[in-house]
């Protein structure tokens, strides 16, 4: 009897030991092999634009499709909230952390904490500037420099094709720029791409950036800043480069309120490719959108699974993006997914 009892107790202790081990970091690396549901902590910036709403929706849907448990946190446009969220993911012992950095800098400390906790990190959509790039495993997103370059190249060709003349009778086209969030990689790099392409153009001397100011990627701020551009520069403005469609849509309202025709008196190019700007292009109120693709969820989940299985992944993966001028809008709108 004594012998039977000691065998039963022994078996019980063994079962308990196996059960308690399921939270260790070595088990984290085996997540994704089918035995345990992967838990991903994801810190999103907020909901500043139509694009961002589509990005969030796509990530949530992709997590569900991939069978990944997503702990979603909305930072409400504050880096400090993102840092808090990442720390909370570490404390909860998630398998993997993903986040869209609102600004480029200031991430080294918290990402070192994630690395020390052996939790891999994926950067999504925007870029970071770090002293040590080994603090993240992969970046999935868009190429902001190319988006900025494409915006200028399209404008340059369009002004020539349309035989446009500066509205003030001078020899230069005057450009105003609505920039995105200050310090964000997308704002910095879209400006960089745009000005680089402008300087490289044989027609560089025909363009001048009159003013460039943040509209914080929102429709309301885009409208307000455009109103102030119009007050200061009135009939001098030939071109608006809005670093996202939402700001362009706000600016269109300001231009109409000033008695001008958006898309005609002022040529408008923006970035994103959301349905709202396609509608504006169909109505003749905007001229072109350079796509920034928010459908990054599937790639994110696939990459997370590979990392957790110990497979090698590309450090930088860019999603596909196109350029959509107004004359393609009517045919393209029905197939747009966001
Ligand atoms: O990071 C992508 C940018 O952020 C999109 O262009 C903009 O609409 C969004 O808010």
Image (tube, rainbow, N blue to C red):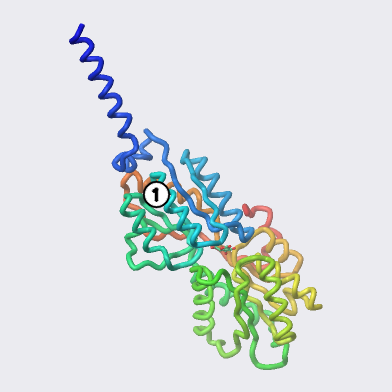
Residue that extends furthest to the bottom in the rendered view of this protein:
170
- Is 257 placed left or right of 75 in the picture? right
- Image spot of residue 127 (x, y percent): 45, 64
**Percent x, y for residue 94?**
40, 45
**x then y, percent, for residue 114:** 36, 53
Taking depth in this image into account, of 143 and 73 the one nearest to the observer is: 73
Looking at the rendered image, the quarter that the C terminus falls into is bottom right
- The mark tally for this picture is 1
Quarter where residue 174 is shown? bottom right
The quarter in which the N terminus is drawn is top left
Q: Residue at x 29, y 29 (%)?
A: 18
Instruction: Residue at the far left: name it.
Output: 3
301 over 242 or under it: above or below: above
Q: Is residue 170 left or right of residue 195?
A: right
Q: From what the image shows, is residue 70 above or below residue 317?
A: above
* Res 324 seen here: yes
Residue matched to label 1 = 90
- From this view, report whether residue 298 is shown above or below residue 245: above
On the image, which quarter does residue 242 sit in?
bottom right
Along the viewing direction, whichever of 76 and 156 lies nearer the viewer: 76
Image quadrant in which you'd find residue 254 = bottom right
Picture coordinates of residue 295, whole percent (x, y): 54, 53
Judge left or right: residue 60 versus residue 138.
right
Examine the rendering and report whether any part of residue 157 can be seen. Answer: no
Q: Is residue 251 left or right of residue 23?
A: right
The residue shown at (44%, 53%) is: 86
Cβ of disc 1 within 8 Å of ligand 1? no
- Identify whether 91 is placed above or below 250: above
């Amino acid at each position: 009897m004594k012998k039977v009892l000691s065998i039963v107790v022994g078996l019980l202790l063994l079962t308990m030991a196996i059960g308690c081990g399921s939270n260790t970091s070595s088990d984290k690396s085996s997540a994704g092999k089918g035995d345990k549901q992967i838990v991903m902590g994801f810190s999103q910036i907020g909901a500043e634009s139509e694009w961002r709403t589509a990005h969030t929706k796509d990530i949530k849907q992709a997590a569900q499709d991939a069978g990944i448990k997503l702990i979603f946190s909305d930072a409400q446009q504050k880096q400090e909230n993102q840092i808090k969220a990442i720390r909370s993911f570490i404390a909860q012992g998630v398998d993997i952390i993903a986040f869209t950095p609102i600004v480029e800098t200031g991430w080294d400390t918290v990402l070192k904490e994630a690395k020390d906790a052996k939790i891999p990190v994926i950067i999504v959509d925007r870029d970071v500037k770090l002293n040590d790039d080994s603090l993240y495993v992969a970046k999935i997103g868009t190429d902001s420099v190319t988006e900025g370059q494409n915006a200028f190249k399209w404008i340059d060709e369009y002004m020539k094709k349309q035989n446009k003349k500066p509205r003030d009778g001078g020899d230069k086209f005057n450009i105003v720029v609505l920039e995105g969030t200050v310090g964000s990689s997308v704002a910095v790099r879209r400006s960089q791409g745009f000005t680089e392409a402008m300087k490289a153009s044989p027609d560089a001397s025909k363009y001048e950036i009159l003013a460039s100011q943040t509209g914080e990627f929102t429709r309301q701020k885009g409208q307000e800043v455009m109103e102030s551009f119009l007050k200061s520069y009135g009939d001098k403005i030939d071109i608006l480069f809005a670093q996202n469609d939402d700001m362009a849509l706000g600016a269109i309202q300001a231009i109409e309120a000033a008695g001008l025709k958006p898309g005609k008196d002022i040529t408008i190019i923006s970035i994103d490719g959301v349905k709202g700007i396609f509608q504006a292009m169909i109505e003749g109120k905007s001229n072109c959108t350079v796509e920034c693709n928010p459908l990054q969820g599937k790639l994110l989940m696939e990459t997370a699974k590979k990392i957790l299985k110990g497979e090698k992944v590309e450090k930088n993966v860019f999603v596909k993006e196109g350029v959509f001028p107004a004359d393609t809008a009517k045919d393209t709108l029905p197939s747009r997914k966001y």
